[in-house]
Image: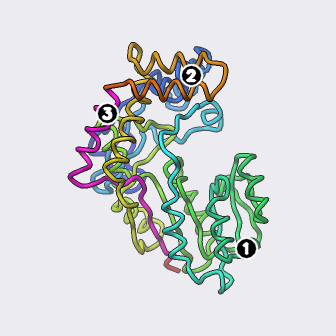
Amino acid sequence: MSTNCPLCGLPPRGVIQTFTAAQTAELFTSRVLGREPNRRMEAILKDLWHGETVQVMRCDRCDFGYADPFVAGTAEFYQLEAPDTPYPRDKWEYRHTLQQLAGWSAQGATLLDIGAGKGYFLSQLIEAGWNPGNLMATEFSAAGRRAIEGLGVTCHPTDVRALEVGERRFDAICLFQVLEHLDGYDALMDAVSRLATPKAHLFIAVPNGARIDFNEENGLQYDCPPNHVSRWRPKSFQVFAEKYGWTLEGCALEPAPSLRDEAVYGAVNRFIRQSHVPGTWARTVYAAARRLPNRRAGQAVKALGLAASPDAWRAGARVARAAAGGGVPHALWAHLRRRV
Ligand SMILES: [Zn+2]
């Protein structure tokens, strides 16, 4: 029995991916980094899924992908995972949201940033004239919390579903690169509605579901649960908004990368994917980099290994060719408005 779609409640229409706990443990905590953390990760995943595998299911009605079992990563999972970041974190959604918020600060508007990271978006708001006293954040990481409080913004290390702020309500609420990590939408949207003023605005940014599928189809990295447990497209947000009594005011996609950027992204990302496959050149390079005394030397070895990898550059060329017929943006943004 597979899990019904978390948005529309109907059975799925197909399977996008199937991952075993062993495969997934390798992707999040590679054996190259040591046997013991890898074994611990595999045990965490089996506990979480009550079994050996997880699938990513497809709902065609909602144009939505979701993990089955639909369970988010635990604190234990996030403490153990050792992510490779193939690309600088893009801030397109910040700029795009700032444009929507032009003129709001003068009217004394209030904003809550859920999972605010290091407070980069909040600092842009303050630069744009917002009073830090009108802003609030939630963030778990100690480093992020310090950075946010350094801006003069109150930061709660709390899940928004349990956030208590007395009588305070917010005119705008932001969920940037957060929703794809979460399960439990009913409790999430109960909390968001409780914290929102009437007719409040909700701004959401997620990885573009079409881009995730594109990456996997072109031999780049897999996007595995339980880090991301959902894949969103504009239609998914339409269903999501309706379900919780909000109106979808609009969706936007980040401009697609240039073909040159696609080629580099493809090569780097392919090299990382292959580093998880025993017997490959990329795996050898990662194992060698691991034995070096410091991180910088390790990075240099990886860069040289990548430069000497025909497989990676072939993948880069393939990704650029695939994108030439119409680019596939990395980020998807949605603007929801509370109906009452
Ligand atoms: Zn659905």
Q: Secondary structure at mark 2?
A: helix
Q: Mark on residue 43? A: 2
- Distance from disc 1 to disc 2, alpha carbons, whole Å, reads 42 Å
**Category of crowding for the residue at label 3, using alpha-carbon neighbours closer than 10 angstroms: few (below 14), some (14–19), many (at least 20):** some
Q: Secondary structure at mark 3?
A: loop
Q: Dot 3 corresponds to which residue?
A: 219
Magenta-highlighted residues:
311-338
Q: Dot 1 corresponds to which residue?
A: 168
Query: Residue at point 55% right, 20% down?
Result: 289
Q: Is mark 1 within 8 Å of ligand 1?
A: no
Give the image's coloring scheme: rainbow
Of all residues, the one furthest to the bottom in this rendering is 107
Disc tally is: 3
Left or right relative to 9: residue 77: right
Residues at circles 1 and 3 in contact by the CB criterion of under 8 Å: no
- Disc 3 marks a residue whose amino acid type is Gly
Q: Residue 46 versus residue 284: which sits nearer the camera? A: 284
Q: Residue 250 versus residue 319: which sits nearer the camera? A: 319
Q: Residue 211 versus residue 303: which sits nearer the camera? A: 303
